[in-house]
Image (tube, rainbow, N blue to C red):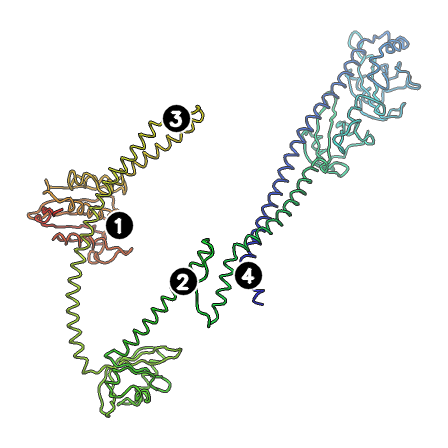
Amino acid sequence: MAEAGRARYSLRRRIIVSTLLIFLASIWALSYYASRMLREDMERLLADQQSSTLSYVAAELNHALEERVIALEEVARSITPSMLSHPDTLQQFLEYRPVFQDMFNSGVIAVSLDGTAIADVPVVAGRRGTNYASNAATRTTLTKGKTVIGRPLVGRVLKQPLFNINAPIVDARGKVIGALFGVINLAKSNFLDRIGEHRYGKSGGYLVMDLENDLIVTATDKTRVLQTLPAPGTNEMMDRRRLGFVGSAVSVNSLGEEVLSSASRIPASNWMVVAALPTKEAFAPIRDMQRRIMLAAFLLTLIAGALSWWLLRRLFAPLLAAVESLARMSVASNPLQPLPLVKHDEIGQLVGGFNQLLATLGQHEAQLKTERDFFSAVLHQSSDGVLLFDPDDFSIREANPSVCHILGYTRDELLALKYSDLLAEDREIAMENVQRIRHGKTPFIGERQFRNKDGAAIAVEVSASLVETGGRQLIMGSLRDRRERKRTEAELQRHREHLEEIVVERTAQLRRLATELTIAEERERRSIAQDLHDDLGQILSIIKLRLTSLNIPGGKEWAGDLMQQVLHIEGMVDQANRSVHSLSIQLSPPMLSESGLVPALEWLSEEMLHNFDLIIRIYCDGPLPSLDDTLNSLLFRIVRELLINVSKHAMVGAAEVSVVTDGDNLVLTVSDDGVGFDGKRWLAPSADGGYGLFSVRERVTYFGGDMQIDSQPGHGTMVVMTLPLDTVKRRPVR
């Protein structure tokens, strides 16, 4: 059962499963994205190809129609009224134009103004004498005098699908006196067969539609010739074609098959040629690609799973070995030992951390044993008597030598007694106090009367509390003989006085060390600033000169790229040089040692305005006495620290710094009109745990000066530091 649980929560198993899931999700997302993009790209490519092919076909058909219309109009213009009056002459006229006749595979017919056929070539039995006035195209030509391409229909004489092209015959005054129309039989070989005889792709085809009459003129599938187009509202794509849409789109045709179709108009007639290709053929490569991707995903999943299992098994082998070692060490009889460190990877770090923890635990156990021995020694060496007794039966469990000395018993004699046997006063009150300590867990402090071994009553100061040891609750009573108390208090007073002397001495030492540390820090700042300026600044300048004088070899293009890198490095060197210069100034402003304290404070005011947007006004009543560089730096740092406090906490935009001499003293003042604070609590730690003002006072005090702070909430702050002139003029030996 435990093995099953470990297998269920196995980290290796979860990592493998998670990796496979992520891998599968990535593969399937890539498959979906690739198939979608491929389909869109294929659809766009096929649509462009289809539209290009269809434009060429439509142009060819339009040219063939225009050629027949032009030829029919030219022959019609050559027919005179006298020819219409003599049908034989007209018949002979038409028969002598074989090229013209070849354009119309079912012949050419001339009709009189009433629509009766008076001549035809070739001669077809029953056609001459037939009245064609019922034909809409012929009637339009006779009445309106314009060339018209007729509606495809089944001929009355030939009984085959056909359409005609009608041209008017006019006299010299332009009056319509008849009509000449050529008949194209769709069942015979004709110029439209270049569409019908070819397929688009393997299963696609072409379609020529008469949108005005909702008829299929011709198609690759000859069974669809003269079929009626789907009624409006039944086929969305056909409705769009009727409205003039000639683009490419995927739709369902009238046969219920999804196709990719394109259309193009034939300007010579109100016809439209359409090319359609079933999507199952158009997008067959995409489906093949999807199947290949799925197969590749399946194979990659198997390979990734096997590799992940093998790799993780190998990587986690040290961890499994460590787990087995820990399981063996969990047995109480086996000692804790460091685990073997195989590799210095994350698992190695874990094993190393465990070994370090084990070492720390050993140290803690050793320390605990030491402390236990120490407290045992303290218990036995304590001048106070200590008793441990059970609050249930009051039997004494432990007694130290001091309590034996106070009561006059040996340890074994006390362990044979009960706590109640030692009491010389009302035992019921003592029992109530014990129960109160036990249940309320509040210690008891007071005086009790005990009887010693001789039966005499002695006054003992008792301090009792509840303790836990060995999983049981006991009462620990600390007994102190009052006779020893006075002696102890006197000794304690001597220790207290001695301790106060030590505290005063240590405080003075700490003040001196803190100030000397500050002085050393200022010297180190100047040294670091000097090193940055002299050493690192010169190195950066030399690098800049070397980069500037660098000669770039090679061709123009390669040299140009390298030059950009050199210029970029030069910019970085300049930036580093500026940073070094700024850092050296921040560490130790050069004007502090060159010009003195007041010019350095003026420079500081510019820095505060630039960095903290704080306006600083500097006031000095005259030349200052010559100050030591270290003292100059300390005073400068103190003013800077106070001004930073103003910018952070005073919530004011200006402050004032005053440096004046007052008799035998140098007075340095920093003031603002900000929010202020409780001046009585300025020596307490700040909210972030700092002791800034306390540190400032200690530094001023070290030089024999004094610092006063005048501040109240809402009334601003003034910090006044007074230093004796004999101190500030004194120059320590370097």
Name which of mark 3 and mark 4 comes first in the sequence: 4
Q: Nearer the viewer, mark 3 or mark 4?
A: 3
Nearer the camera: disc 2 or disc 4: 2
Residue with the mark numbered 2? 357
Number of the label disc, if any, that sits on residue 552 = 3
Residue 244 shows in the view: no
Name which residue type carries label 2: Leu
Numbered disc 1: secondary structure: helix
- Residue drawn at 42 percent across, 61 percent down: 355
Q: Looking at the picture, which amino acid does disc 1 mark?
A: His
Identify the element where label 4 is drawn. loop
Q: Earlier in the sequence, mark 3 or mark 2?
A: 2
The foreground one among 635 and 16 is 16
| Mark 1 or mark 3, earlier in chain | 3
Q: Position of residue 12 (x, y in %)?
A: 54, 57
Q: Mark 3 belongs to which amino acid?
A: Ile
Alpha carbons under labels 3 and 4: distance apart? 63 Å
The reply to whether residue 536 is in sight is yes
Kindly report the distance in space between the C-alpha atoms of the residues bearing marks 1 and 4: 55 Å
> On the rendered structure, is 159 left or right of 512?
right
Residue 649 badge? 1
The residue closer to the viewer here, 154 or 608, is 608
Q: Nearer the viewer, residue 703 or 414?
A: 414
> Residue at 62% of width from left, 40% of height from top?
34
Write down the residue under mark 4. 9
The quadrant of the rendering that contains the N terminus is bottom right
Q: CA distance from mark 2 to mark 4?
A: 25 Å
Q: Is residue 224 above or below residue 312?
A: above
